[in-house]
Amino acid sequence: MAKKGWDEFEIGAMLRTFDGKIDDIAGTRQEDRAYSQNSSYTASVADWRLIKPVFNKDYCIDCQFCWIYCPDVSIVSRDKKLIGVDMDHCKGCGICVEVCPTNPKSLLMFPEQADEETEIANWPKKDEEEA
Amino acid sequence: MSEIKNIKNLKEFSTSADRFEGANLLCPGCAHSIIVREVLNATNDDMVLSASTGCLEVCTAVYPYTSWDASWIHIGFENSSTAVAGAETMHKVLKRKGRLKQPDRNPKFVSFAGDGASYDIGFQWISGCMERGHNIMHVVLDNEVYANTGGQRSSSTPIGSSATTSPAGKVSYGEKKNKKDLMGIMAAHGIPYAAQVSPNKWKDMVKKIQHGFSVEGPVFINAVSPCTTEWKFDPKDTMHLADLATDTLVFPLYEIIDGRELNITYRPKNVIPVEEYLAAQGRFKHLFKDEYKYLIKEWQERVDAQWAYLQRREESRV
């Protein structure tokens, strides 16, 4: 379907989240869903972000606190494991870093332009005083 | 379908497939979407949803996008509750007449509204739904201010808070009236279940939501939703503010069953002084000036009195 602009929809149009029929939404993962162009899943708010979370899986204990407390459904968790951050939908609020219980934290905020691999290589060491 | 979803721990909960999408236009660090996600993920059943005018509605349905993966409607400031109540009645009647295409599916009817749409504008409509006994759940996202229109006071705004229609300054300390006890009012309708929840206590919240889905009749849920813009704190501290709200007992977590039986569901191990809760927010900044310091003491006394009242209600079982 060709992408419609905001002034090309009919007045009072009903927006459908999915293309075609979907029976069991609660049992279908986001990557398996046929989102239509009207779902905000297809949009991006990445340009809101000034700082971004970087995920270091070496220290992650898969407690899923970041998953439940993420306001933007941006923490991607599959089979009880945290696999990454959805950078299209993350607004960079930093809640995930605040609720992360590990020492050192497995999620940290860096400036948007920072290089992820360099930051992971220079990850802070365990903070003895805090523990 | 329609059996209660088994959620023992957070790892198990994290296997839920979200039905609320990102790239909504809520502020970074907004607690509204955390609450919505916890409610939607508490069940695998179909959902019929509505939202009153307010932050949640204007930010999740910005034309031509929608952030909802379930049937969702916005119709007015006051009548999100009546909209789902109408849908619920239609579902019930069609089921009775045998005209439903999939009669084995039992959708859950949930309406979301902010505190302005529940405490003030939609008050009469919610009261009507509670009185008529629809099988719906009404969730209040209580951020204690009309955040969507720029921070006007609502009847949920607590004493001393500086809102744009009750600003603090040389002659005033801000809002002068105490927060309305909507929980008490709703429980007085004799509804089967009313509860206060907080997004930081996810397990308590999911338990209450699931209980609300399992009972027949109207359910009222009041959720505290720290607002980074109007409470004036850093977006990353949303969960810290929710922690403070529950641990200082400013927002105690309890439930009222059948309008009578009150249970306190969360007792903080260390009760934090209310002063810390006030100090964390910009809207109470002026209370720390010498001339208004007496208000902090009054706050503490009020919170203590309310906690004592709740405990006595719980003990007396009336």
Image (cartoon, rainbow, N blue to C red):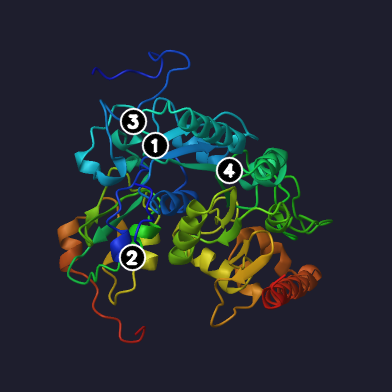
* Amino acid at circle 2: Leu
- Left-right relation of B298 to B284: right
- Residue A94, can we see it? no
Question: Are discs 1 and 3 located on one and the same chain?
Answer: no
Residue B112, placed above or below residue B258: above
Gap in Å between the C-alphas at discs 2 and 3? 28 Å
Q: Which residue is mark 3?
A: A17
Amino acid identity at mark 4: Ala
The chain ID associated with circle 1 is: B
Residue assigned mark 4: B113
Q: Chain of mark 4?
A: B
Mark 4 and mark 3, same subunit?
no
Q: Are marks 2 and 4 on the same chain?
A: yes
Q: Secondary structure at mark 1?
A: loop
Q: Check if mark 1 and mark 4 are on a common chain.
A: yes
Residue A121 pos. (x, y %): 15, 67
Note whether B131 is above or below B275 in the view shown.
above
Tag nearer the camera, 1 or 4? 1
B31 or B309, nearer to the observer: B309
Disc 1 marks which residue? B70
Badge 4 marks a residue whose secondary structure is strand
Residue carrying label 2:
B10
Lateral position of residue B173 relative to residue B147, left or right: right
Picture layout, residue B219 above or below residue B134: below
- The first of marks 1 and 4 along the sequence is 1
As measured in the structure, the alpha-carbon distance from the residue carrying label 1 to the one carrying label 4 is 17 Å
